Structure formats: structure tokens, C-alpha cells
Amino acid sequence: MTTDTTDTSRAWTLTDLHHLGLTVSDIDRSIHFYRDLLGMELIGRRPSVTAGYVGQQTGYDGVELNVASFRIAPGCRQTMEVVQYMNHAGEPALTETNRAGNSHLCILVDDLLAAVDELTAEGVRFKSEPVTITAGPNEGGRVIYLLDPDGYTLELFQPPVTTAPGATE
């Protein structure tokens, strides 16, 4: 049973998803992975971000960031940014998906098997072979987890093929 618990008495509302940000250890390696291997569009590059507000925002006074922004596909409003801390860099996180506080990014693909073949040939690390979804609203779709160069989990998802009402196969 789903209960709508939206508080309509607030003075503000969430309006959209703007971007996902990932901290990386080597921005050039990450640009190669996201642009050249996955095919995302590099839409912005700021190699030395030092504005005072960034130190306030991150909590690291005097921080310098190297930032690249991507779009999954033309026309997609949401973006992804990768950020390398040029100073104040911390130890790498433990990124296993079973650890509370971790996340993964799910990206839609039109041909999961072809994507896996091409990415495997490029040395991309996967957590399994492609999996066919056997239950639930995505039954018949395909899915796989892969790792970016820093071990962040990405999910490639090919939705199930749906047949239009009245169509014959």
C-alpha cells in the first residue's frame, strides 16, 4: 500500500533532478571513460575552480577542483559532473553497493548485449554477465553492473520490449 505523505504546507518544493556529481581520482582517465568509452557528451570543462564559495560549499577552505560535465544524450536535461580535488583530496571510498550511503547511476541503453561486448573489448570491469529480469515491472529487460575507473557502480538497463495493444508479432 502506497500512502502519499507529501507535505503541502512547506514554503518550497523539489522541482527536478539537476545533476549527479562524482568525485574521481584522475579526471583525464574519467573523461576518457565517460566520453570515449560510454559515449557521453562532454559539455563543460573547468580545470581550476577556486572561487571562494566552493570552499564554503565543500567545507574545504582554499579548495581547488578540476571539473568536467557530461550529458548522457542530446536533449537530456540532467547532467553528470566528475570532480577531482586538486588539494584536500581524501582516501578513496569503499564503493560496494551493499554499503549504506553508497549509490549507483542507472543509464538506459537500447542494446545491452552490444554495449557489454564493446565495453568488454575496451577492458571495462563488470560485476556479472548480463542478467535478464525475470519478475516485476521490468520483466524481460536486461541489466548489468559495471565499474568506472574509481570503482563507482554504474548500471546499464535495457527496458523490456513492449508490444503495443492490438499489435501482432
Image (cartoon, rainbow, N blue to C red):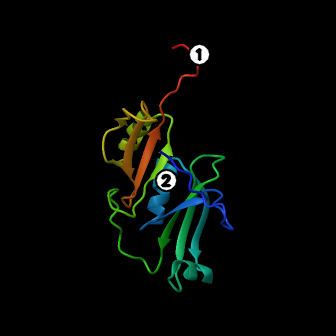
Local SS, label 1: loop
Q: Residues within 10 Å of mark 2 (few under 14, many from 20)?
A: many
Is 163 above or below relative to 38?
Answer: above
* Residue designated by label 2: 34
Q: Is residue 48 visible?
A: yes
Q: Is residue 51 visible?
A: no
**Foreground residue, 88 or 123?**
88
- Identified by mark 2, the residue type is Tyr
Say which residue appears at 58% left-offset and 59% top-offset: 19
Left or right: 80 as drawn, with respect to 103: right
Local SS, label 2: helix
Is 36 above or below relative to 18?
Answer: above
Is 16 above or below relative to 90?
Answer: above
- Identified by mark 1, the residue type is Gly
Q: Position of residue 9 (x, y in %)?
A: 66, 64
Say which residue appears at 57% left-offset and 75% top-offset: 48
Q: Position of residue 70 (x, y in %)?
A: 57, 56
Farthest bottom residue in view: 61
Say which residue appears at 52% left-offset and 26% top-offset: 162
Total numbered labels placed on residues in the image: 2
Q: Position of residue 143 (x, y in %)?
A: 40, 40
Q: Which of the numbered marks, if any, corresponds to residue 166?
A: 1
Say which residue appears at 44% left-offset and 39% top-offset: 115
**Marks 2 and 1 close (CB-CB < 8 Å):** no
Q: Which of the numbered marks, if any, corresponds to residue 15?
A: none
Q: Residues within 10 Å of mark 1 (few under 14, many from 20)?
A: few
Q: Quadrant of residue 11?
A: bottom right
Left or right: 18 as drawn, with respect to 101: right
* N-term-proximal mark, 2 vs 1: 2
